[in-house]
Amino acid sequence: MSANNCSSASKHSGHPCFGGNHQKAGRIHLPVAPGCNIKCGFCERKFDCANENRPGVTSRLLSPEEALDRLRMVMAHPEGGTNMRVVGIAGPGDPLANEKTFETFRLVKKHFPQLMLCLSTNGMLLAERIDELKELGVHSITVTMNALTPEVGAKVYEWVKVDGKRLSGEAGARVLLERQMAGVEAAVAAGMLVKINTVYIPGINDHQTLPLAVTARKLGARMMNILPLIPQGIFRGRQRPSDRLMDLVRNQAEAIIDQARHCNQCRADAAGLIGQDIDLCSLKKPGPFPGTLCGAGSKEGLSI
C-alpha cells in the first residue's frame, strides 16, 4: 500500500474513479468533445457497437444543450439520480481541444452545482487551460501518459498537432511529454485531484510503466490507472495483456503510488455505476419531439 492512501482517502471518497465507493457513487460521461489534437496508435473511434465498452466510443455526439438534457434524464432515473456524484467529459476526442467542453461544464455548474466536474485529457493543453478549469471548479483531472521518453512516445503516437502543425515521430512525442509534465504540475498546484492513466503495451512501453509511476508521484498525482491494451489501430495485431500480468504490474506499481483497480475502460457516453451502466436507449428524450437518447449521431470532426 502506498503512502498516499491515508492522506488522500477522504478527498477521493466521493469520486468512483478516484477510490470512492464505485458501488454507490455514479458518474456520467457527456460526449461533447469530438476533436483531438493527437493520434494514439491504439485509438479507434470510427465505429460503435451497442455492446462495446472502450474509451473513445459514443453512439451519438451531443451539443452542450443536449448534454444537459441527457444529464436531466439520467438524474431523473430511479437508479441514476440517487447515486450520481460526478459529471465527466472523456471524449470521444480530447476535452480541452473542444470549446463545447467548457460550455457544457458551465451549464452543468449552473443547473447541478452539487455534482463534481472532472475530465480526461492527453495533457497537451492542460497547462494552457488550467485557469479556465479552476474557474469552473473542476474537481479532478485524469491525464493519459503512455511514455516517458520521445523514443518510446514515437512508437505510441502517430502524430501530435502543435500550433496548427502535425508533428510525427520523436519531435511530436517530445512536445507532448513536456506539456503533459507541465499540465500535471499545474493541475496539482491548482488543487485538483490528478490521476495518471497509462495504457500498457507489451513490447512497446511496458518497460516504462514503473518509471511512469515514480514520475506520476513526483509530479503530485494521487493515483495511477494502468490499463491493458485493447488491440486495435496500429496495435491490432498485438495480444491483449492477461489479467494475471496486469495484476502483477499493478501490484508492483502500488508500492509507488495508489492504483485504480476497478476501471472498466468506460465509453465516452457511459452513465450510472461503474459496471452497471444505465441503458440510455430506455430514457425518453425531453421536448416535443419523441425519441431516445442513444440514437445515431454525427461522427464528423473526430480529429482536428
Image (cartoon, helix red, strand yellow):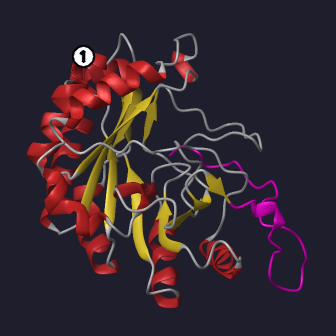
Q: Nearer the viewer, residue 228 or 110?
A: 228
Q: Is residue 111 magenta?
A: no
Residue at the (46%, 45%) spot, across then down: 263
Q: Is residue 72 left or right of residue 148?
A: right
Q: Eyeballing the image, is 110 above or below 46?
A: below
How far from the left and from the top, in percent, is residue 190? Answer: 17, 68
Q: Nearer the viewer, residue 154 or 43?
A: 43
Q: Is residue 50 left or right of residue 68?
A: right
Span of residues in magenta: 278-304
Q: Is residue 212 left or right of residue 164?
A: left
Q: Answer with the quarter of the image where residue 274 lies.
A: bottom right
Q: Is residue 193 visible?
A: yes
Q: Is residue 295 magenta?
A: yes
Amino acid type of the residue tagged 1 in the rendering: His
Residue at the (52%, 12%) spot, across then down: 239
Q: Main secondary structure of the magenta part?
A: loop
Q: Quadrant of the N terminus?
A: top left
